[in-house]
Image: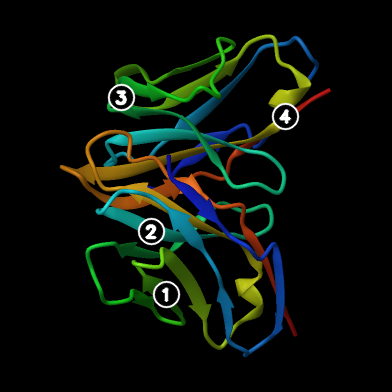
């Protein structure tokens, strides 16, 4: 079974700083997807960034980028020029790239607070 | 299309009562998922539908839980004889899967269930 571990329960940075959230996972699969989801307080979970395991290039979406280390099974999220609106729970998630459920396996989450 | 819609947003019920939640997915998406999220944890997979067929159920889904998706449109999740341990956020998500390529989920805002 796949597992996802986020070792930082909480993080706090000042506005405009750069912050990196850690995620490690365990799988015997070779083809899979990795995701970062953001869940603001009392609001729905939204997709931040998606990475396909067969791609060596790290995914980037505006201020959000990942450092994907397949051999180390590490998938960290870097938020540059952090904004107050980035305050949220962040979940790392794994999905097998096969036929079947393609269900997401989530980590425990990191609560990120951006301070003014 | 305004995204994935879940109703009600909040539900308080007495132990032993039955409750039903509804999810309206994005119309172009062919898959619908139910997840459960307890406080401070990442969501956990409950079940999913491919069109109207329920293809997988988690062991978390006891006999008191039933999900349906008539005609492959909206879905309902019913919990019979609720217990305090059922208190959680119930998340619905839909996705478009073409062959084995997943484009990620779109989540609804969830239904928060409190069993008293």
Q: How far apart are marks 4 and 2 (CA)?
A: 29 Å
Q: How far apart are marks 3 and 4 (CA)?
A: 27 Å
Residue B72: give its label. Answer: 3
Q: How crowded is mark 4: few (under 14 residues within 10 Å), some or many (20 or more)?
A: many
* Circle 3 SS class: helix
User: Of the residues under marks 1 and 2, which one precedes in the sequence?
Assistant: 2
Q: Do the residues labelled 4 and 2 touch (CB within 8 Å)?
A: no
Q: Are marks 1 and 2 in contact (CB under 8 Å)?
A: yes
Whether callout 3 and callout 2 share a subunit is answered no
Residue under numbered circle 4: B87
Q: Are marks 4 and 1 in contact (CB under 8 Å)?
A: no
Whether callout 3 and callout 4 share a subunit is answered yes
- Which dot, 3 or 4, sits closer to the camera? 4
- Residue B2 visible in the shown view: no
Whether callout 4 and callout 1 share a subunit is answered no
Q: Distance between the residues labelled 1 and 2?
A: 10 Å
* Circle 2 SS class: strand
Residue under numbered circle 1: A66
């Amino acid at each position: 079974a796949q597992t996802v571990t986020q070792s930082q329960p909480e993080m706090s940075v000042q506005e405009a700083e750069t912050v990196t959230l850690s995620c490690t996972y365990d799988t015997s699969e070779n083809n899979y997807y990795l995701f970062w989801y953001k869940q603001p307080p009392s609001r729905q979970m939204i997709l931040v960034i998606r990475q396909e395991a067969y791609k060596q290039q790290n995914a980037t979406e505006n201020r959000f980028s990942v450092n994907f280390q397949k051999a180390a099974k590490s998938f960290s999220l870097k938020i540059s020029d952090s904004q107050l609106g980035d305050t949220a729970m962040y979940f790392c998630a794994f999905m097998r790239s096969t036929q079947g459920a393609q269900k997401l396996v989530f980590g425990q989450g990191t609560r990120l607070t951006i301070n003014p | 299309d305004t995204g994935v819609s879940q109703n009600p947003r909040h539900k308080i019920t007495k132990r032993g009562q039955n409750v039903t939640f509804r999810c309206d997915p994005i119309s172009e998406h062919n898959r619908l998922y139910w997840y459960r999220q307890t406080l401070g944890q990442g969501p956990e997979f409950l079940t999913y539908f491919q069109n109207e067929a329920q293809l997988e159920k988690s062991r978390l889904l006891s006999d008191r839980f039933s999900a349906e998706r008539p005609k492959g449109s909206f879905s309902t999740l019913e919990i019979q004889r609720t217990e305090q341990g059922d208190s959680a956020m119930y998340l619905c998500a839909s996705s478009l899967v073409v062959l084995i390529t997943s484009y990620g989920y779109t989540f609804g805002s969830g239904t928060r269930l409190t069993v008293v």
